[in-house]
Image (tube, rainbow, N blue to C red):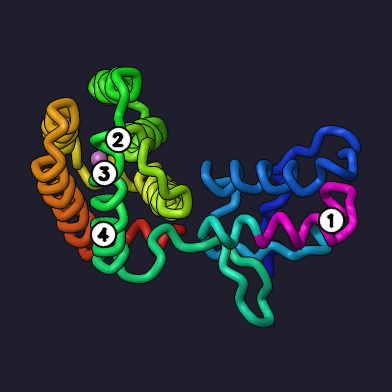
Amino acid sequence: MTQKPNPLSSIKVNGPIPAHLARSVIEETLRAAILDGRLPCGIALRQQDLADLFGVSRMPVREALRQLEAQSLLNVIAHKGAVVAPLVQGDAAETYALRILLESEALRLSVPLLEASDLEQAVRYIDELETETDYSKIGRLNRLFHMSLYSKAPNQRLLKLIDEALNEEERFLRFNLQAMGLGKLSQEDHRALLRAAENRDVETSMNLLVHHLNRGVEVMTRYLASPEAQNRKALK
Ligand code: NI
């Protein structure tokens, strides 16, 4: 039997880490490695291996893993420990149904309070999306565009839940957007959504958002059922 390459070998640690920074350094380092695929889905991360790698005790490792679990990047599984989460957790349709509820509410609360600078920022994200060809950046710009429209919602816990869901989607898109062929379709939705927000038309903006997210779930469900997606899953 051949030895599998150690996934942690792709992670570089620079020098000794000051104790008070240990948790955040470990968290940021692992998050980056999960997002860019160096730590692939299904890989188990052992606390002791990580403690050795970072030259720290297991306590900050445990705390960092807990943070990453809260961000849906890891699942803690009995007898296996922390395992890098699959790209889509559970049912995509259920995930989107929740997103529609949360994001419509955030939009409803935020649109009347948006300032000119928020709307200008949203325009810049749309413009960047127009020319960006790097698939890892398209997901990020999509997330930032959406968050800019929700940003004035006063309920911080609502915004945090939405941000986590959008991070999960960004991670999925980074690996699958090219194969999904979503293309410019969603840009028309984004522009219409922005126009409604600029007009302070809460009802129209909410309808457009629901339409946009429903279209997203259709494309994603069709893609996940396609032979191509099944093959990609088998490769991972
Ligand atoms: Ni979008």
Q: Quadrant of the N terminus?
A: bottom right
In this rendering, is residue 206 above or below 78? above
Question: Could you say which quadrant of the image residue 125 lies in?
Answer: top left
| Distance CA(mark 2)–CA(mark 3) | 7 Å
As shown in the figure, which amino acid type bears the numbered disc 1? Ala
Find disc 2 in the rendering and name its residue.
149
Question: Could you say which quadrant of the image residue 146 lies in?
Answer: top left
Q: Residue at x 68, y 42 (%)?
A: 29
Find disc 4 in the rendering and name its residue.
101
> Considering the numbered disc 1 on the image, is that residue within a helix, a strand or a loop?
helix
| Distance CA(mark 4)–CA(mark 3) | 10 Å
Find disc 1 in the rendering and name its residue.
51
As shown in the figure, which amino acid type bears the numbered disc 3? Leu
Q: Which residues are magenta?
A: 52-66
Is there CB contact under 8 Å for labels 2 and 3? Answer: yes
Where does residue 215 sit, x and y in percent of width and height? 14, 51
| Distance CA(mark 4)–CA(mark 1) | 40 Å
Where does residue 2 sit, x and y in percent of width and height? 68, 64
- Observer able to see residue 125: no
Q: Residue at x 35, y 45 (%)?
A: 173
As shown in the figure, which amino acid type bears the numbered disc 4? Leu
Where does residue 149 sit, x and y in percent of width and height? 30, 35
Instruction: Sort mark 1 into few (<14), some (14-19) or many (20+) by Cα contacts within 10 Å.
Output: some
- Observer able to see residue 177: yes
Q: Nearer the viewer, residue 202 or 59?
A: 202
Find disc 3 in the rendering and name its residue.
107
Q: Is residue 101 left or right of residue 157?
A: left
